[in-house]
Image (tube, rainbow, N blue to C red):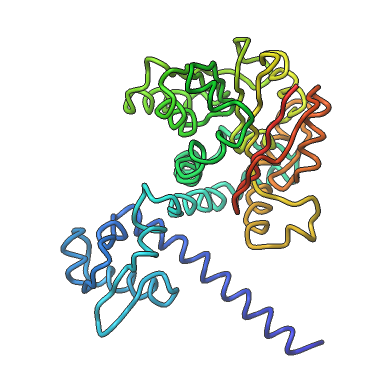
Amino acid sequence: MDEAKLNEFMGKLVYDMGGAAMLANMILGDELGLYRAMADSQPITPLELASRTRCHPRLVHEWLSANAASGYIEHKQGTFRLAEEQALVLGIEDSPVYMTGGAAVVAALFHDKDKVVKAMRGDGGLPWGDHHPCMFSGTERFFRPGYRAHLVSQWLPSLEGVEEKLQNGAKVADIGCGHGASTIIMAQAYPASTFVGFDYHGPSVEVANQRAADAGVTNSTHFEQAAAKDFPGHDYDLICYFDCLHDMGDPVGAAKHAYETLKADGTVLLVEPFAEDSLEENMTPVGRLFYTASTFICTPNSLSQEVGLGLGAQAGEARLHGVMREAGFTRFRRAAQTPFNLIIEARK
């Protein structure tokens, strides 16, 4: 036995356990408004923060101390400060780098552990709708900042001729739309176009329609419950899949239906978790996160459906191109990328 290697691994495990515990602390701070109350980046004492948020001062002191020990908050001479950079990540929900929503997704992994145990000892399936409710709200809050930051400014302009169509009035379908964050962002940016979001999870569709009403885009946007292989409509100029194709039991069948309902000069926008084509290339912090999420969420959902291809969240670009090729598409390319996403354009 290599004792140095053992100690190194134990240190890594303790570090990871502390990180997992801090995610629970992050969720606590988010729900109580503690990070938001510090988002002005001014030094504050535990007593002042407790008074501002109507929380117990002793527990606030412990919460702040845990954040300081983790490097999430600065500490100096009895005061604590959420630095501007930290506030963008933890306390300002409109920030393009806001990450607190992702902690709720991780929380759902713990809530749903027994369901995944059953899936692993059974047929492998765990449908999306059977997850803990925090999965749905957390997923929306995790992805929405990236969509706000990149969708209109970078991803859509990177597609050949699509932005001009949207400005002039295009017909758009958003498949697997969830709570409708991506659909509404596009509708707000391109008022001349019409948008319909489809999702097979009924409760999410209800939330999405309420989100559209709150955003004032119901004249051009609505949401319907439908599966990816048989959603209604035809002659779409643009069909979008945001972080969902790999979750589907039959992504080839879904892509074939998109091919059939797309105009001859139409475009598919495929946004998928960032991944290279091999495990060795994906042994990164992002890969670790996505493989774990795929174990609990993406792959069990696919296995719960017909075909059950089980692409997983780290399918990689080559395999995604293969899916689109099998569906009939002949042109595809990586149009853009971020540390978290691949943006692929597919055309007939």
Report the residue at 41% width, 69% height from top. 72
* Residue 239 horizontal/vertical position (percent): 61, 23
Residue found farthest to the bottom:
3
Instruction: Locate residue 2 relative to residue 203 in the image: left or right.
Output: right
Q: Locate the N terminus and report the quarter of the image it occupies.
A: bottom right
- Quarter-of-image position of residue 97: bottom left
Instruction: Tally the marks.
Output: 0
Report the residue at 37% width, 22% height from top. 217
Q: Locate the C terminus and report the quarter of the image it occupies.
A: top right
* Residue 321 horizontal/vertical position (percent): 78, 36
- Quarter-of-image position of residue 339: bottom right
* Residue 251 horizontal/vertical position (percent): 73, 29
In the image, residue 288 sits, relative to residue 170, either above or below, namely below
In the image, residue 301 sits, relative to residue 212, either above or below, namely below
Instruction: Locate residue 272 relative to residue 179 in the image: left or right.
Output: right
Report the residue at 41% width, 63% height from top. 25
In the image, residue 53 sits, relative to residue 160, either above or below, namely below
Q: Give whichever of 347, 227 is nearer the camera.
A: 347
In the image, residue 307 sits, relative to residue 334, either above or below, namely above
Report the residue at 73% width, 30% height from top. 249
Instruction: Locate residue 99 relative to residue 335 in the image: left or right.
Output: left
Q: Give whichever of 164, 333 is nearer the camera.
A: 164
- Quarter-of-image position of residue 266: top right
